[in-house]
Image: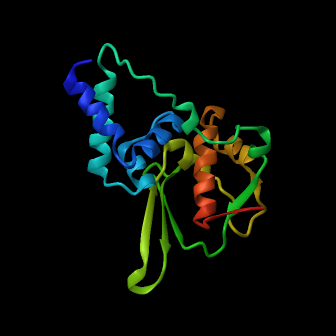
Amino acid sequence: MKFREASLLGACLAKDYAEDMFRLLATYKTISSSEAASRLSVHIKTTQDFLEDIRYSMKVERIVMDLDLSGLQMAEEMTDLRLKLKIKELQHAGARFTTARSNDYLSSVVVWAGSGRNRTEKKINLSVPQGRFLFHLPFPSAEPLSIEEIMKKAGVDRNNVPEIVDIVQVLIELKVVQAA
């Protein structure tokens, strides 16, 4: 690796959000810049630059740096027990679900916090598997379903379990999804 490539990679690793960015890269099969930016509350251009520098660094013939990303993945094992968690949308959650143009999955979730001038908006861009999963999330008035049942109903592959469990945890923390 030439110095220029090493300095780009080193600069990426020195960023405050680098560990979180690598956690997303390790958890998701594919993630767009806008999805990563919205999840980490980092500007889209900053995220694009980071991912471009990493991608550029990874195109070189040899990187003599051993970075174990397995520790950045979800702390808990993806077991059938986790997939049996029953969930549904929380009533009066104060969130807006936006459907994709094809109208068969969600493209984003917007959550508002606070009130008046102190009101803040957090937009989470969703991957296609996450969008398909949340499109089939039971309404507040419906009976909750397990994550596994919703994945089957939505046609989401088991390879996407880490990112599905991740978005469910995020939405539970934001009080958009209720665990039964």
Q: Nearer the viewer, residue 134 or 68?
A: 68
Q: Name the quadrant of the N terminus.
A: top left
User: Image quadrant of residue 9?
Assistant: top left
Residue at horizontal 27%, vertical 26%? 6
Name, please, the residue furthest toward the bottom.
116
Q: Position of residue 141 (x, y in %)?
A: 73, 70
Residue displayed at 75% across by 65% down = 142
Vertical position of residue 51 compared to residue 102: above or below = above
- Between 71 and 135, the residue placed more toward the observer is 71
Q: Residue furthest top?
A: 61
Image quarter where the C terminus lies is bottom right
Residue at the location (62% across, 32% down)? 159
Coordinates of residue 29 in the picture (x, y in percent): 51, 33
In this figure, which colouring scheme has been used for the structure? Answer: rainbow
What residue is drawn where x is 51% and y is 28%? 68
- Residue 3, position as x, y percentages in the image: 21, 23
Q: Is residue 151 left or right of residue 50?
A: right
Decide: is 9 above or below 45.
Answer: above
